Every structure is written in C-alpha cells, then in structure tokens.
Amino acid sequence: MIGNRLSSSQRGFTMIEVLVALALFAIVSAVMTASFLGQMSFTLRAEERQGAIAAVTQALDQLRLSDPSTLPTSGSATQTVSAGEREYQVVTIYCQNSSLCGSSSRHIVVSATYRNQKIYEAQTVFARLR
C-alpha cells in the first residue's frame, strides 16, 4: 500500500477544485454572453437608425428638386424607401405648421418607420430662393 501512493506532483485536481473552476467559467461565460447580446442589439438599432436617416434624406432630396409653390399645402404622402437591406415607410406631411407655409414656402415633416416603429423624423421649411 505504501508503494501505491502518488507523490504530490502526480496527484490530479480534487472534485471541489474542478467544481469551483466550472462555476467560475460559467459565471464568466454568462457575463460575456450578456455583454455580447447587448452589443448586438445596440448595433442593430444603430443600423436601423442610420437607414432611417438615409431614407428621410433621400425623400427630402427628391422634394428639393421641386418648386415649393407646386408642393401641396396640406395632407401627406407615404412611400416605401429602401436603405441598406431594409425598407422604410416614409411619410411626408405638408404644412403641418400652417404659419410656416406661404405662396412660395412649405413646412415639411418627413418621418421614417420600420416595423411599425418610428425611427427618425426631420422637419424643414422649403422656400424659393430669389
């Protein structure tokens, strides 16, 4: 029996040491997974917002080509605009603030919606330059 004993350098880990190591690994893995998922969610929302800004900018650029006096004095228009890999519903509202609308100027509000959630909105006044 004495000859069968292992020296201290040949012994393995005890069950408690293995369980403690596994518990630490599980805790670190859970924290890293939560952090990774949070970062992915943040990145997705940032991409959606960036696409919405591009969609609104595209709609405003199209309107800039028009003479403000030819634009409607009330009402709204809806269009689907592709930006990146997403399609946004872009709503343009004309003369929401009627005090900013005149014979040669229009108050315009443009908003982009993705998956029934408004992501971005911009307001401007278009006027004819003399």
Image (spheres, rainbow, N blue to C red):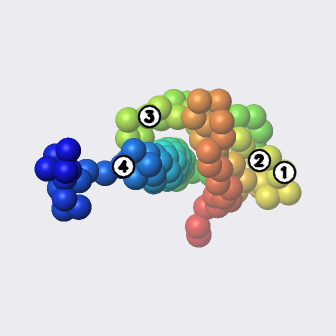
- Identify residue for label 4: 14
**Mark toward the start of the polypeptide (2 vs 3):** 3
Q: Give the alpha-carbon distance from disc 4 to disc 2, as whole Å.
A: 77 Å
Q: Amino acid at mark 2?
A: Cys
Secondary structure of the residue carrying tag 1 is: helix
Label 1 sits on what residue type? Ser
For the residues bearing labels 2 and 1, Cβ distance under 8 angstroms: yes
Task: In the rendered structure, find residue 95 and report the number of the disc placed on it.
Answer: 2
Assign a secondary structure to mark 3. strand
Horizontal relation, residue 48 to residue 74: left or right: left
Q: Residue sitting at 47 percent across and 32 percent down?
A: 87
What percent of the width, then of the height, locates residue 51?
47, 46
Residue that numbered label 3 is attached to: 86
Residue, far front = 1
Upstream in sequence: badge 4 or badge 2: 4
Cα distance between the residues tagged 4 and 1? 79 Å
Q: Earlier in the sequence, mark 4 or mark 3?
A: 4
Q: Mark 2 or mark 3: which is in front?
A: 3
Question: Disc 4 or 1, which lies upstream in sequence?
Answer: 4
What amino acid does circle 4 point to? Answer: Thr
Q: Secondary structure at mark 4?
A: loop
**Badge 1 density bin: few <14, some 14–19, many ≥20, Cα 10 Å:** few
Residue mark closest to the camera, 3 vs 1? 3
Q: In the rendering, at what x and y percent does residue 23 appear?
A: 47, 48
The answer to which image quadrant residue 71 occupies is: top right
Cα–Cα gap, marks 3 and 1: 33 Å
Q: Mark 4 touching mark 1, by CB under 8 A?
A: no
Q: Which circle, 4 or 2, is nearer the viewer?
A: 4
Indicate the quadrant containing the N terminus: top left, top right, bottom left or bottom right.
Answer: top left
| CA–CA distance in space, label 2 to label 1 | 5 Å
